Image: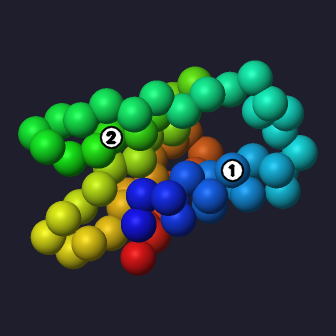
Amino acid sequence: MVRAAVKAVEEELDADGVDASTWRWTLTWLERKPVVELDDGTVIRYNPDSETATITSNDFEAEEG
């Protein structure tokens, strides 16, 4: 789920022509769940109850299954 969400964000940035080549993802664990943050502030959180990942950012919001 989380990997698919990361891929979706990267594909969206690429489709929008954003040069994110110097941006990095940071993985942390909060209450035993992964939280992934991109340098632009995009955050991906894993939802274990629904086995999905939620993407939150200024321009891109979606739920990946």
Q: Between 29 and 17, which is closer to the camera in this rendering?
A: 29
Question: In the picture shown, does residue 4 fall above or below 17?
Answer: below
Q: CA distance from mark 1 to mark 2?
A: 16 Å
- Residue 10 tag number: 1
Image quarter hosting the C terminus: bottom left
Q: Is residue 5 left or right of residue 9?
A: left
SS for callout 2: strand
**Amino acid type of the residue that numbered disc 1 sits on in the rendered structure:** Glu
Q: Is residue 33 left or right of residue 8?
A: left
Q: Is residue 45 left or right of residue 23?
A: left
- Residue 35 tag number: 2
Q: Residue at x 72, y 56 (%)?
A: 12
**Amino acid type of the residue that numbered disc 2 sits on in the rendered structure:** Val
Image quarter hosting the N terminus: bottom left
Position in image of residue 43 (x %, y %): 43, 40
Q: Residue at x 51, y 38 (%)?
A: 42
In this rendering, the count of numbered labels is: 2
Position in image of residue 60 (x %, y %): 58, 52
Q: Residue at x 18, y 65 (%)?
A: 48
Position in image of residue 33 (x %, y %): 20, 47
